[in-house]
Amino acid sequence: MSKSKDTGRSFSTLNLILIIQLVIMLGLSIFITLTVSSKTKENAINHMNGITDERANIIKSYVENSERTLSYFSKSQQIVDMFMNPDDGNYKSAAQAYTNEFAKDIEYNEGLWSGTLQTEVLTHSSYDPANPDTAGIIGMVTRKDEDRRKQLIDALEAAGPDGVYNTGIIISPASGKQCLSMYKGVFKNDKMVGFVGLGIFTEGLIDTLDKVPVPGIKNSFYTMVNVNTNKYIFNKDDKMVDKEIENDELLKLCEKYKGEKDSATDDYEYESDGETYVSIYTYMPEYGWILTIDDTPGEVFELQRTMIIYLGIFGLVVLGLIIVFNFISKKQEKINQKLVSTIAKANITKKSLNTAMFKDVLTDVNNRISLTVDLQKAAEQKKTDPYYFVMFNICDFSGINSKYGTIAGDNLLARIGQVLKEHYEAENIYRTGSDEFVVKIPTAGGSPAKDEIMDRVNIAFRELQATIRIDEETAIYPTFKVAVIKTKNNVDASVVSSMKDMTNKTGEATYGLIDFRDMT
């Protein structure tokens, strides 16, 4: 009898222990599920933020290259000579020949031309002396309305000798197709004597964007809108191009950023035709455009959903293992191994960005796309040594451009690239934004150490602050925001956002007091 009672008590004690273990394991399972789910969702958003920023930079580079092309054309000797000798037919013929030759190298060219201050066309890339159908192009007045003509001339005068008047992406009245339209004044001795114009079909920009893959969100689509007109520039439905925006959330963003001078990246959710979408957007203040990449939550957060399902199954397995307690240790070990393996593979997958590689022409350093690709390759090599990342962000770069001109701004950027190449390997230097540079510093066996890293950063920082003399009376005294981060080897492009946050919080850097953060 006593033995029966002892057995009963032992059985009850065992049940109690199993129940306590069950409660603890279920609690841990729920906690892990919520924690991993939250972190996975955050990483998915950061991943899309990086992709959106990359595409915004592709668009900016495309527009800047087009503006640079028009500037080169406006300063050509044949064009200037024609405007300085308007009554000499030889100069005009030479300018027309040069216009045709120059236009051959412009892809997706809608029209390259030059005109008088009365908007009379003098040369045009579509003009062919052997084709009588094109005879009416030369001598045509493009803006007969005096108010519209004055608006154009005033804008060109305001842009000055170094500026380009970019009217943005419009539907061309000549071809009826969407194109990037811009004008540039032709100056002689600081006096505008004429102007040139360029229209480039947006097919080239669309082709460039389409060639860059979107890893992990293959069913996503991008949209671009003009905040000043509330109209679509790009849309997955071609019929909506140049039409009024129908998305209420997107309209709210247009109102929010209209007139805003600072760039921004964020996300929101909306519903369309009964389907919910996650939208990551980047605002480009230079042009008043918002670029979005949209996809369904099911694909954006697919890894999060997979982790929730897996951890739910894990909880059920734990329950079964507790019931069959004699196998619990062995089964638990296998499940933990599978969990660690799945999380490791998931981390590698999230950091893989199969993007094309571009070079920043102005500074001759790598750009943000290259940074993403290089980080992906480094992660695939499975090295164990950490990395240091250094960001140099020019303070008030837009103010420098406004005060001293874009040529002075370009010279400053080129000089920064040159100084950084004197202190770091060129292959590890990246221009990640219009006014920011990032240096990647790999380590091996603990070398270089943190103190050596910071000494080199301070030396480079001091040289970057050197005065840039424009002329005898004018000089630029550049200042910078600087941040240094130490990370694990398997890092993605979101490290740029982390350094942006650091520089925005600390403000202008001081020699010897550079902000450092250890994220290992």
Image: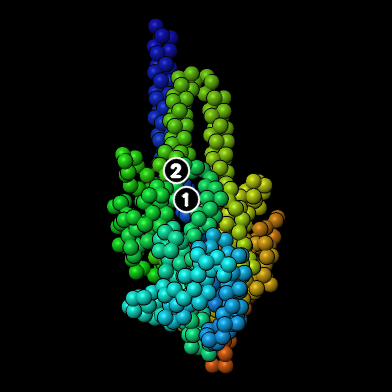
| Picture disc at residue 48 | 1
Question: Are dots 2 and 1 in contact, CB under 8 Å?
Answer: yes
Instruction: Left or right? Give the position of 132 relative to 254.
Output: right
* Residue 487 visible at all: no
Determine whether, in the image, residue 503 is placed left or right of residue 297.
right
Label 2 amino acid?
Val
Q: What quarter of the picture does the C terminus occupy?
A: bottom right
Comparing 76 with 267, the one in front is 76
Residue placed farthest to the top in the image?
Answer: 1
Quarter the N terminus occupies: top left
Residue type pointed to by label 1? Met
How far across and down, in percent of the image, does residue 292 sit? Answer: 42, 53
Q: Secondary structure at mark 1?
A: helix
Say few, some or many: other residues with alpha carbon within 10 Å of mark 2 (under 14 / 14 to 19 / 20 or more). Answer: many
In the depicted structure, whether residue 191 falls above or below residue 299: below
Q: Residue at x 57, y 90 (%)?
A: 471
Disc 2 element: helix
x and y, in percent, of residue 310 in the image: 47, 32
How does the figure colour the protein chain or chains? rainbow
Q: CA distance from mark 2 to mark 1?
A: 8 Å
Question: Which percent across, then down, holds residue 135?
Answer: 50, 70
Q: Is residue 101 visible?
A: yes
Q: Which residue is mark 2?
A: 300
Looking at the rendered structure, which numbered label has been put on residue 229?
none
Depth check, front residue: 137 or 225: 137
The image position of residue 76, as x and y in percent, is 59, 78
Q: Is residue 7 left or right of residue 86?
A: left
